[in-house]
Image: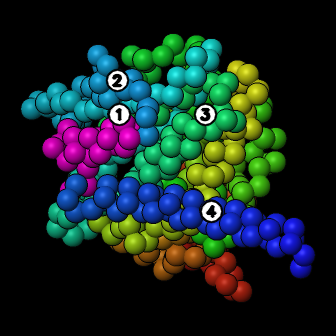
Amino acid sequence: MNKINKILALLLGCCSWLYGQNQQKILHDLRVDVVYLSSDFLQGRQTGTEYEKLAAAYVARRFEDIGLTPAGDGGTWYQFFNYNSNPHATGGQQEQTGRNVLGMIDNGAATTVVIGAHYDHIGMGGPGSLHAGPAAIHNGADDNASGVAGLIRIARHLKSSEKAKANNYLFLAFSGEELGLFGSKAFVNEPVVDLDKVNYMLNMDMIGRLNDEKSLVINGAGTSPIWKPVLEAIEVGGIKITTTDSGVGPSDHTSFYLKDIPVLHFFTGIHHQYHKPADDAYLVNFDGLLDVTSFIIALIEDLDDNGKIEFTKTKDVSEDRKAAAFKVTLGVLPDYAYSGEGMKIDGVLNDRPAQKAALEGGDILIKIGDIEVKDIYDYMEGLSKFKIGDKTKVVVKRGEETLEKQVIFE
Ligand SMILES: [Zn+2]
């Protein structure tokens, strides 16, 4: 090795060492944010409680450290909203107050990109819980401390990015999501920026469980013609994407889609701890969270020179299904990250038809009654044909075997 090569080798070594240090710093911050937000200290971050306030204050402090500008009510970090704690209750319902946390990077641009994640969760349980035992803290590490940690990481990156100057960026940590998207609805009804100037909205809800295959689900890919070509061209950390088109789904991006704004929802899939006290930080895949947020950063920087992107309405599966009005359920958690043929069951709920018919997590449902199930939508279509008390056969693949089971809907 001559002298110049030695110097080059030293410089390269130095660069990769620095790069490694940087990755370690990002991973450290992601861990701190997820561990704190999902700790027992915050008691499950239920909207309207003292613990929601503590969680909001933490996010605001992070935004302040990064150097974002407060974009809430009267120059504060917070946007307050009122909601009814139990809209179905007859009498005795109480109006309560929740708070979104808002921080801005103002690049003096004509358009603003909204990046969001909900920070509230379901407290000690209640109607949203799938937990069967006595009241317990629902820590919500994946749902959605993971998304909030991602939000903070992306804010920190974009604050100093030279490749993201053509938009302003509004970082929005929503509350009231678990109770019914209250925080995001409140924002779109009283936005702090002109909604006509919002370029697009990205929502992170449950991005902490990237699997070994690195399958990332991206919902809303039909809400702009630009999404699919841009998403398919991004190569980050070996991530493989699966997209769905609809802009309507069970999270905050829906509120923006319904105002004709292109949206995407990033999601690493459902799991056995979903809406249970066991959704804990030690189960979060932090390397995966780093990759997913790097993927989102690559998307934002790619779109920097694209101007205002076009919005398209999608055929909304959930609206079609509303018409079909499910009368029955099987009592399974579908594996949304599965992209093969059929509907893969991630878990079965206790005491429901699927469990009574001896179906198991991991089974792939390929037929329900006479209906061939090629994907989750065929499955939903299939379900809509039955009513309570009906009996039918379902066909599942379990490993190499193909099994036929009888289910009774209830
Ligand atoms: Zn969530």
Q: Quadrant of residue 242?
A: bottom right
Please report the bounds of the magenta region as a residue range. 43-65
What residue is disc 3 on? 263
- The residue type indicated by label 1 comes to Val
Residue drawn where x is 62% and y is 17% of the image: 109
Mark 1 vs mark 3, CA separation in Å: 20 Å
Tell me which amino acid carries mark 2. Answer: Gly
- The residue singled out by tag 4 in the image is 18
Distance from Cα at disc 4 to Cα at disc 1: 33 Å
Tag 1: Cα neighbours inside 10 Å, few (<14), some, or many (≥20)? Answer: many
Of the residues under marks 4 and 1, which one precedes in the sequence? Answer: 4
Mark 3 and 4 residues: CB-CB less than 8 Å, in contact? no
From where the camera sits, is residue 335 visible?
Answer: no
First in sequence: mark 3 vs mark 4: 4
In the rendered structure, the answer to whether residue 86 lies left or right of residue 392 reads: left
Q: Which residue is drawn at 61% across and 33% down?
A: 263
Q: Are marks 1 and 3 in contact (CB under 8 Å)?
A: no
Q: Does the stretch in magenta take in 54?
A: yes
For the residues bearing labels 1 and 2, Cβ distance under 8 angstroms? yes
Real-space Cα distance between discs 1 and 2? 7 Å
Q: SS at mark 1?
A: strand
Instruction: Please tell me which of labels 4 and 2 falls first in the chain.
Output: 4
Residue 221 point in image, percent of width and height: 69, 40
The magenta stretch spans residue 245: no
In the rendered view, would you say 111 is above or below 353? Answer: above
Mark 4: few/some/many CA within 10 Å (<14, 14-19, 20+): few
